Image (cartoon, rainbow, N blue to C red):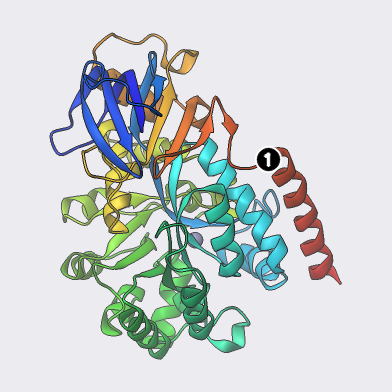
Amino acid sequence: MIVINGGTVLTVNDADDVHFGGHVVLDGDRIAAVGAGDYPGGPEAGTEVIDATGMIVMPGLVDLHYHTAIGKGFCDHLPLLESLEEVWYPSIRALDPETADWAALNSYAESIKNGVTTVNDMYRQLGALGRAAEEIGIRAVLSNDVALPEHNLDTLQDNQDAYAAVHGLGQGRIEVYVGIEWLPLASPELLRDARALAGELGTGIHVHLNESLGEVENSKERFGRRPTEVAYDAGLLGADCVAAHCVWLTDHEIGLMRETGTHISHNPSSNAKLGNGVARLPEMLAAGINVGLGHDAAESSNTCDLFDVMKFASLIHRAYRVDASLLQAPEVVRMATRNGAAALRHDTGQLVVGRKADVILVDTANPMFTPLMPGDKAHIYSHLVFSANGSAVHTTIVDGRILMRGRELLTMDEQQILAEANQGFLRTLKAING
Ligand SMILES: [Zn+2]
C-alpha cells in the first residue's frame, strides 16, 4: 500500500474536486482512497508513506498518439510525405528487434520522466515493444504499422501474431490494437479486413486519418471520397477506434466521427512542425467528440513531453482564431488525462476510488510554479498548461508501481538505455545506407 499525504490532489473527476493538503491511497494496482487532509487510516505494516508537501498529485498523462522513436533531428524542414519517405519509412523498414527494444525503452523512459503513464504506440516489432513496456513499467497500447503489401511495412497477419504474442502482458497493462498506417498506403478492402480482425480479436483500432491536404487529395483521387468517408464506409470507425490528427475534417466528416463515437487524438505540435495545418478542435469539442492529446513521434515533434503538447493545444487555436478564450487550462488537462483514458477504454485518467493507480507527483518548488496562490485551483491549472514542462514531474506511478522518483528511473538503468539507443540508431543508419 502507498499513502500519499500532504499534496494538492487534482482529481480531474466529474466534479473537478481539488483537495489542498489531501491524500491518495494506492492499494495494489488500484486507488483505494482519495480525500481531504492526511489519510485517516493508521499506517499498516508494509505501507509506504510519501510526503507530497509542495507537490500536485494528479492522474498520469495519456499520450493518445505515439510512435516509438529511433531517430530525431533529421530533415526537420520537410513536409509530411517527404519526411515519411526520407526518414520514417527507411528507418522502420531497417529496424531489427534489438533496436526496436532499446528505441522503445528510450521513448518510454522519456515519457515516464515527463509524467506520461499510458502510450498509444503504433510501431513495428511489437514483440520487442511489449517486452520493453513490461520491463520499464509503462501502460502501453501497441499497434502495427499495417499497409498494403507493396509498401513493405506490416500486414494484418503481423498484427494478429503480435496480439497472440504480447496482448495481456504485465497483468493486462500491455494491449494490442489493430493499426492502419494511413489511407495513402491502404485500400477500402484493407480497412474492412482491419475492422474484421479487430472484431475477431475483440480489440480496438488505431489509424492516422486526414492528417494532411495531400492525404485528402490522394483519397479523393483514388477513392472518390474524403478520408473519413472512406473509413466510415469501410466500417473502420467506432467507439473502439482512435483516429489520429483529423486536421482537415469537413462538417460532414465531423458528423461521421460523432455518429460513430470515434475518438480523436489531437497532435498540434506535430501538425504545426510538419506544416499540416490546424485541426478544427473547437468544432470537434462542440460536436461532443472525445478528443485526447498526442505528441505523435519524436521524429515529427522532437519531444515526448506532453506538457509541451498541452500548451500547443491551447495556444495554436487562440493564435489561429484570434480568440484568447479558447481551450482554457482545465479543459486541456482533461484532454491529456481522462479523455485519453476514455479513448482507450481504460480505468485511468482520474483520481477516483476503484480506478487504476496511475498517478504522478508534480513538484511546485521551482520557478515554473512561482508565484503560487495558496488554495487556488485556477492557478494550479494555469501553471500546469501554460508554464510548466515535464521536468517538473517528480514521481511517476503506474499500476501502483513507482517507475520514477526524484527524476530517477527506478525500473531500469537510464544511462544504459541511452547508450543502447544510440547504438541501435547507428545500426539502423548503417542498414539504411548499406
Ligand atoms: Zn503518427
Toward the viewer: 226 or 163?
A: 163
Tell me the amino acid under the disc marked 1: Asp
Q: Is residue 189 above or below residue 87?
A: below
Q: Which residue ends up furthest to the front in the rendered image?
A: 45
The N terminus - image quarter? top left
Q: Which residue ends up furthest to the right in the rendered image?
A: 434
Q: Circle 1 — which element?
A: loop
Q: Which residue ends up furthest to the bottom in the rendered image?
A: 189
Report the side of 399 relative to 391 (left or right): left
Residue 49 place in picture, x, y as percent: 39, 22
Determine which residue is flagged by label 1.
413
Q: Examine the image and state in which quarter residue 406 appears.
A: top right
> Which residue sits at x=49%, y=72%?
181
> Which residue sits at x=46%, y=35%?
396
Q: Is residue 150 above or below residue 400?
A: below
Residue 176 place in picture, x, y as percent: 44, 68
Residue 329 place in picture, x, y as percent: 29, 31
Toward the viewer: 129 or 426?
A: 129
> Which residue sits at x=39%, y=38%?
310
The C terminus - image quarter? bottom right
> Which residue sits at x=48%, y=70%?
214
